[in-house]
Amino acid sequence: MKKIFFLLVTALCMQGAFAQEHGIFIISYPIAFPAGNLSDYISNTSFRGINLEFGKEVKPNLIAEIETGWNVFYQEQPDQVYTEGTASISGKQFRYTNSVPILAGAKWILKSKNNLVPYAGLGLGTMYSDRSTDFGLYRISTDAWQFCLRPELGITFKSRAGPSAMLGVKYYASFNSSDLDGQSFFTVNIGVVFPYGL
Amino acid sequence: MAIKLSRLLVILSLVLISGCYPNGAEFIDDIDLVYTNYSNQFGFSSKQTYAIPDSVIKITGDIFNDPDGDHKPSFLSASSAAVILDRINQNMLDYGWQRVSKNANPDVILLVSSVTTTNIYYYYDWWYWGWYYPGFYPGWGWYYPGYYPPYVTGYRSGSVLVQMVDAKAVAAGVESVPVVWTCILNGLAEGGTSSIAPRVQTGIDKAFAQSPYLKH
């Protein structure tokens, strides 16, 4: 929790530095679908999350940005037996994964003739994943900072000068680390784009 | 205006995030665990008879607790012991074992014990009084046994342990006994006998269900 608050406060302060430039602030709600090793552990879709991006226009149609967010994955595993060798243990498991991406990247605004403006983006950085399993009175936790690559595609709906709505798809490709295999997932984001400096 | 609104939204997101926590265990029996382990060198199918005492030992923190000087450890109450032992006997019978007295040369012996732990959470430190009397530093202990601060929160957890011992393998002069099957039930010891008894019985049934090698 502390790390996330620190990140958000940093993002908040950095926004002041961009005040004289043209840029965007995006806040969106991600619906996350686990992939790879994460989906072996938790297959449920995550409806708990938030995503924040700050971008600065460096050229017409090119925005440099930083992104952070938080996605919570949860699954209740019914009572079942887990066996390893001669030892067996049975009970209910409550599985949690908290994922926080911290990325820097760019967005390319693509040409459009009408109000719908598509964009494509690529980010890279790190993904912090915290996996906890509650089993009986015990909690088994592992966490990892993993290298993350994030391509995205989306569309903004611009009806007038000022904020516009956005809909996008992102794929967070996290790579294996020593403690955990890559915790990858993709998200569908619905949000608002706030331009500033215009 | 656009800048002020986005600052507000970042602050709002900080508030929203703190409320974003999914549920976990809701009922006491969500936290029950059953653990079993066995020796795969032991031929369970060739053993037919077992003996089991009529009482369940209560494990305490003492090395050897003999409160009334009768050379026996402390035991669980007869009614609580009956809940556990009857269920074990029923499962053994269902699996084709025959109960005999300890003097009738049983193949294995079952030993049952239980332990409860009360976990209390509180914090109290001499440093709290350092402003009043200079020289009280953090980390000092109590010198004179005094009252304990009221506890902030606590819970009781308990375990029932069942060990199956190879009665024929007790060699002369060897001071250890081989355990061929072990079972531990663990969970919250809250809620009174009427709530704990069915959970213990379910746990014993599960322990036998996950030990099919005991079946004849």
Image: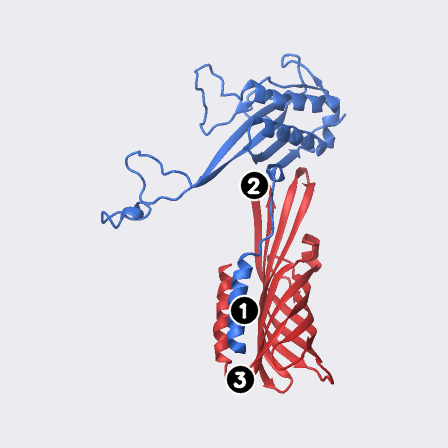
Chain colours: A red, B blue
Between B215 and A85, the one lying in front of the other is B215
Give coordinates of residue A61: x percent, y percent: 65, 84
Q: Which residue carries the number 3 mark?
A: A21
- Within the image, what quadrant is residue A47 found in? bottom right
Q: Amino acid at mark 3?
A: Glu
Residue shown at 46% from the left, 40% from the top: B153
Q: Is residue B32 visible?
A: yes
Asked if marks 2 and 1 touch (Cβ < 8 Å), the reply is: no
Image-quadrant location for residue A24: bottom right
Question: Residue at 62% of width from left, 40% of height from top?
Answer: B30
SS type, badge 1: helix
Circle 3: element type: loop
> Does label 2 lie on the same chain as label 3?
yes
Q: Residues within 10 Å of mark 2 (few under 14, many from 20)?
A: some
Towards the viewer: A140 or B52: A140
Q: CA distance from mark 3 to mark 1?
A: 20 Å
- Furthest-bottom residue in this view: A60
> In front: A163, or B160?
A163
Q: Which residue is mark 1?
A: B9
- In the picture shown, does residue B81 fall above or below A135? above
Depth-wise, is mark 3 or mark 1 nearer the camera?
A: 1
Q: Residue A158 location in percent, x, y?
A: 67, 79
Q: Is residue A146 above or below residue A19?
A: above
Kind of residue sitting beneath label 1: Leu
Q: Tell me residue B101's x, y (percent).
A: 65, 13
